[in-house]
Image (cartoon, helix red, strand yellow):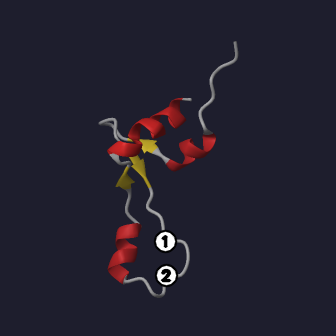
Amino acid sequence: MPKQKNKRAAVKRFTITGSGKIKRAKANKRHILTKKAKSRKNQLGKAALVSSADFRRTVKLLQA
């Protein structure tokens, strides 16, 4: 039987932390940046954690 493969798109977007949480990047920092405040752009550059509502679904993608 062949090995199970991860969803490669998900592997590129998420990383698992040492405590078992899943880290993700924030959206809305690609273009149309002139109208966004400097503080907002600064916050968008930082990593965030996957919410508890999406956690199980994200784990399935990473372990599929």
Q: Identify the residue shown where x is 29% and y is 36%.
A: 19
Residue corresponding to mark 1: 29
SS assignment at label 1:
loop
Cα separation, mark 1 vs mark 2, equals 7 Å
Residue 30 vertical placement versus 9 (above, below): below
Could you say where residue 4 lies in the image, as x and y percent from the top left?
A: 62, 23
Task: Name the residue nearer the viewer: 55 or 42.
Answer: 55
Picture quadrant of residue 3:
top right
For this orientation, the residue located farthest to the front is: 53
User: Could you tell me how many numbered marks the image carries?
Assistant: 2
Q: Identify the residue shown where x is 54% and y is 72%.
A: 30
| Side of 58 where 5 appears, left or right | right
Q: Identify the residue shown where x is 36% and y is 41%.
A: 17
Which of the labelled discs sits on residue 33, or is there none?
A: 2
Residue 62 vertical placement versus 49 (above, below): above
Q: Identify the residue shown where x is 47% and y is 64%.
A: 27
SS assignment at label 2:
loop
Task: Name the residue nearer the viewer: 48 or 17.
Answer: 48
Q: Amino acid at mark 1?
A: Lys
State if disc 2 and disc 1 touch (CB < 8 Å): yes
Picture quadrant of residue 31:
bottom right
Residue 22 vertical placement versus 33 (above, below): above
Residue 63 vertical placement versus 45 (above, below): above
For this orientation, the residue located farthest to the bottom is: 35
| Side of 52 where 12 appears, left or right | right
Q: Which quadrant: the C terminus? A: top right
Mark 1 Cα shell of 10 Å, populated few (<14), some (14-19), many (≥20)? some
